Image (tube, grey):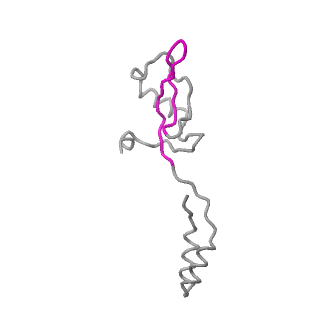
C-alpha cells in the first residue's frame, strides 16, 4: 500500500528547507495520512437456485455482498425487469455498499473497460 502525506506539510518543508538532506529527513518524518482508495461499483442481479425455484438477489459488483436478498422470486435472470430493479434500488437510497464501501455509481460503459 502506498503512503500518502499531507500536501500542506510537504509544501511547508519545500519552502522552508534549503538543504536537500534536511528536506529528505523531514519528508521521512511526516506521518502517513489515513486515506482509503475510492471504490466504484454497481448493484447487479445474481441468480440463486433453491430447492423449489430460482431467486434473484441484488449484489455488489465489487465484493459480492447481498444488498437485497430474494429481490425477485421465480424469475429467470433474463426475464428480470431491469428498470424496475433500478427504481427499487433508488427508492431505498442504496448509494453505497455497506460491506466494502463502494460508491454505486459505476455505469455499464465503465464495466466494459
Residue 48 vertical placement versus 93 (above, below) = above
Residue at x 56%, y 64% (from the top left corner) = 4
- The percent coordinates of residue 10 (x first, y second) are 56, 74
Residue at x 54%, y 82% (from the top left corner) = 15
- The percent coordinates of residue 32 (x first, y second) are 61, 65
- The percent coordinates of residue 53 (x first, y second) are 51, 14
Residue at x 57%, y 54% (from the top left corner) = 36
Question: Is residue 90 shown in magenta?
Answer: no
Q: Nearer the viewer, residue 92 or 22?
A: 22
The stretch of residues the image draws in magenta is: 39-61
User: Is the stretch drawn in magenta largely helix, strand or loop?
Assistant: strand
Q: Nearer the viewer, residue 49 or 109?
A: 49
Quadrant including the N terminus: bottom right
Residue farthest along the top direction in this orientation: 52
Residue 100 occupies quadrant = top right
Residue 38 vertical placement versus 10 (above, below) = above
Quadrant including the C terminus: top left
Describe residue 16's horizontal placement relative to residue 85 as left or right. right
Residue 95 vertical placement versus 20 (above, below) = above
Residue at x 54%, y 84% (from the top left corner) = 20
Residue 7 occupies quadrant = bottom right
How many discs appear? 0
Question: Is residue 45 shown in magenta?
Answer: yes
Residue 57 vertical placement versus 73 (above, below) = below
Amino acid at each position: 500500500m502506498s503512503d500518502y502525506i499531507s500536501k500542506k506539510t510537504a509544501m511547508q518543508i519545500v519552502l522552508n528547507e534549503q538543504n536537500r538532506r534536511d528536506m529528505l529527513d523531514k519528508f521521512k518524518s511526516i506521518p502517513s495520512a489515513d486515506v482509503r482508495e475510492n471504490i466504484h461499483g454497481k448493484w447487479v442481479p445474481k441468480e440463486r437456485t433453491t430447492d423449489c425455484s430460482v431467486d434473484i438477489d441484488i449484489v455488489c459488483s465489487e465484493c459480492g455482498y447481498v444488498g437485497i436478498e430474494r429481490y425477485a422470486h421465480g424469475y429467470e435472470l433474463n426475464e428480470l425487469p431491469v428498470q424496475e430493479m433500478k427504481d427499487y434500488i433508488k427508492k431505498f437510497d442504496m448509494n453505497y455498499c455497506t460491506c466494502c464501501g463502494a460508491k454505486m455509481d459505476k455505469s455499464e460503459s465503465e464495466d466494459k473497460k
